Image: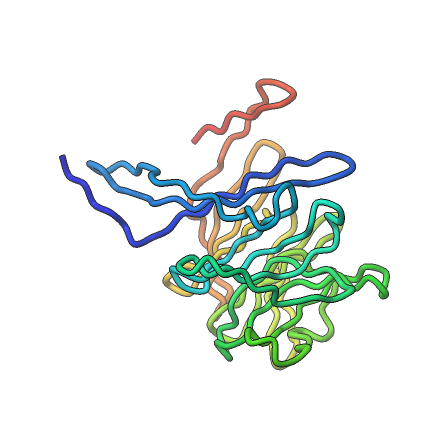
């Protein structure tokens, strides 16, 4: 039997929500390939430093360093960004502000900074992109000064940032970091924005209630291709969905 251990580390975030509170836990597992199939082994609980609190939106800086969004049980909306050292088990609080920070990711340049979404409490909960130094040496600066209502984002290799703009409907934009030029891509997209090895951006286009498409876009010429043709969603109960390919 062929057994191959991947260097890839899988992190699971388990989320339980209610009208009054939200709780999530982080687990680290090893991903093992056995005869062409993947198995999960050796689960480790990571969020014991914030029991019953909000621990979500993890991002790997490297295989042993993790950024994540954290809020205590008593204040589930008072989110800040924390850093976890998986070898030493050291936990470092990177932000401590009156605003709410979410969705951290490492900057492409400079690499000693990280980006996140900030909800400005004193500005009608406006959501913008912000950049902080990892060493906590300063209060950071806006990443995109004139782009608001940001829910999710992904920094691309050609000085553009993919932005999920929250609204009715939500919208996907590609925004140039230096000039602020905005290119509209699609409406009704999924929350996950992922950069591929090719430099393309992968995203889900929710074309209708019945048909969703996994697509990729070249940020240099805005050419769009379908990766997976229509996922067909068929409701089988009030609480579950069946996805057919």
Residue 158 against residue 237 in the figure, above or below: below
Q: Quadrant of residue 127?
A: bottom right
Q: Find the residue positioned furthest to the left.
A: 1
Residue 104 against residue 110 in the figure, above or below: above
Q: Residue at x 81, y 59 (%)?
A: 125
Q: How many marks?
A: 0
Applied colour scheme: rainbow
Q: Residue at x 67, y 55 (%)?
A: 171
Query: Is 116 left or right of 244, judged from the image as shown?
Result: right
Percent x, y for residue 102?
A: 65, 58
Q: Find the residue positioned furthest to the top.
A: 237
Closer to us: 186 or 106 = 106
Percent x, y for residue 68?
A: 56, 56
Percent x, y for residue 87?
A: 39, 59
Q: Residue at x 58, y 31 (%)?
A: 210
Image quarter in which the C terminus is found: top left
Closer to us: 89 or 215 = 89
Image quarter in which the N terminus is found: top left
Q: Residue at x 51, y 64 (%)?
A: 222
Residue 35 against residue 48 in the figure, above or below: above
Residue 229 against residue 143 in the figure, above or below: above
Percent x, y for residue 121?
A: 82, 61
């Amino acid at each position: 039997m062929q057994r191959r251990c991947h260097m890839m580390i899988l992190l699971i975030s388990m989320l339980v929500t209610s009208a009054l509170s939200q709780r999530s836990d982080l687990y680290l597992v090893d991903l093992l390939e056995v005869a062409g199939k993947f198995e999960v082994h050796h689960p480790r609980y990571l969020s014991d430093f914030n029991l019953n609190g909000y621990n979500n939106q993890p991002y790997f800086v490297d295989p042993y360093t993790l950024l994540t969004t954290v809020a205590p049980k008593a204040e589930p909306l008072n989110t800040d960004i924390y850093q976890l050292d998986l070898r030493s088990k050291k936990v470092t609080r990177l932000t401590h502000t009156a605003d709410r920070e979410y969705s951290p990711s490492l900057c492409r340049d400079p690499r000693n900074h990280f980006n996140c979404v900030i909800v400005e409490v004193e500005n009608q909960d406006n959501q913008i992109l912000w950049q902080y130094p990892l060493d906590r040496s300063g209060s950071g600066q806006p990443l995109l000064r004139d782009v608001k209502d940001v829910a999710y984002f992904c920094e691309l290799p050609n000085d553009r940032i993919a932005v999920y703009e929250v609204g009715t409907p939500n919208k996907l934009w590609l925004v140039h970091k230096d000039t602020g030029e905005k290119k509209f891509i699609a409406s009704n997209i999924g929350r996950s924005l992922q950069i591929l090895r090719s430099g393309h951006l992968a995203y889900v286009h929710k074309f209708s209630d019945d048909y969703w498409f996994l697509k990729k876009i070249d940020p240099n010429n805005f050419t769009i291709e379908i990766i997976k043709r229509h996922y067909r969603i068929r409701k089988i109960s009030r609480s579950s969905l069946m996805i057919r390919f």
